[in-house]
Amino acid sequence: MIKSGLRILLAAFYAFAGYAHIVRPEPFLTITPDWVPYPEAVIFWTGIAEVAGAIALVQPFSMKLRQAGGVGLALYALCVWPANINHFAIDMAREDGGLGLVYHVPRMIAQPLLIWLALWVGGVIKKP
C-alpha cells in the first residue's frame, strides 16, 4: 500500500515537472550548464522523458513497462544532477546567497533518494 502510494506520488511529481519543462522552460534554462548542447531541445525532451516515465510508472498493464519507467526516471535523475549542482553554484555565488544552503543541501541529498525511489516503486529493487 505504501509502495503504491509512493509510486503514484512520484509519478505525479514527474508528470508535473515534465509539464513545467515543456510549457515554461525558462527557469530550467537558467540552471543548465553551459556545456550542454542545444539546451532548449534538451529541456523539452527532458520534459517528455519525465511525462513518459510517469505514465510508465502508473500504467497497470505491464510490470516490464513499469520497471522501464523506474529505470528511465532513475537515469533521468542521475543525468540532471549536474544542472542541480550548477544551480547550487550559481545561487551560492550570488551576493545575497540565493536560496541558500537550506534549499540546496536537501536538494543534493534528495537526488540519490529519488534515484532509489524510482527503482523501488518501479519494481526494479525488490526490498526497501
Image (cartoon, grey):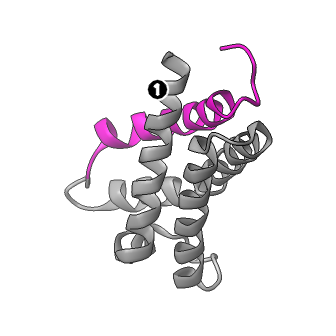
Residue 73 in percent (x, y) is at: 64, 48
Q: Please state the extent of the stretch shown in magenta in the rendering.
A: 99-128
Q: In the displayed structure, would residue 98 be above or below residue 58? A: below
Foreground pick, 60 / 80: 60
Mark 1, Cα crowd under 10 Å, few <14 / some 14-19 / many 20+, is few
The verdict on residue 103 being magenta is yes
Q: What's the residue at 60%, 49% (across, down)?
A: 77
User: Is residue 72 toward the left or the right of residue 18 in the image?
Assistant: right
Quadrant holding the C terminus: top right
User: Is residue 70 toward the left or the right of residue 101 in the image?
Assistant: right
Toward the front, the furthest residue is 61
Q: In the displayed structure, would residue 93 be above or below residue 99? A: below
Residue 31 in percent (x, y) is at: 44, 67
Q: How many labels, in total? A: 1
Foreground pick, 42 / 60: 60
What residue sits right under mark 1 in the picture? Answer: 5
Foreground pick, 53 / 39: 53
Q: What's the residue at 44%, 69% (across, down)?
A: 21
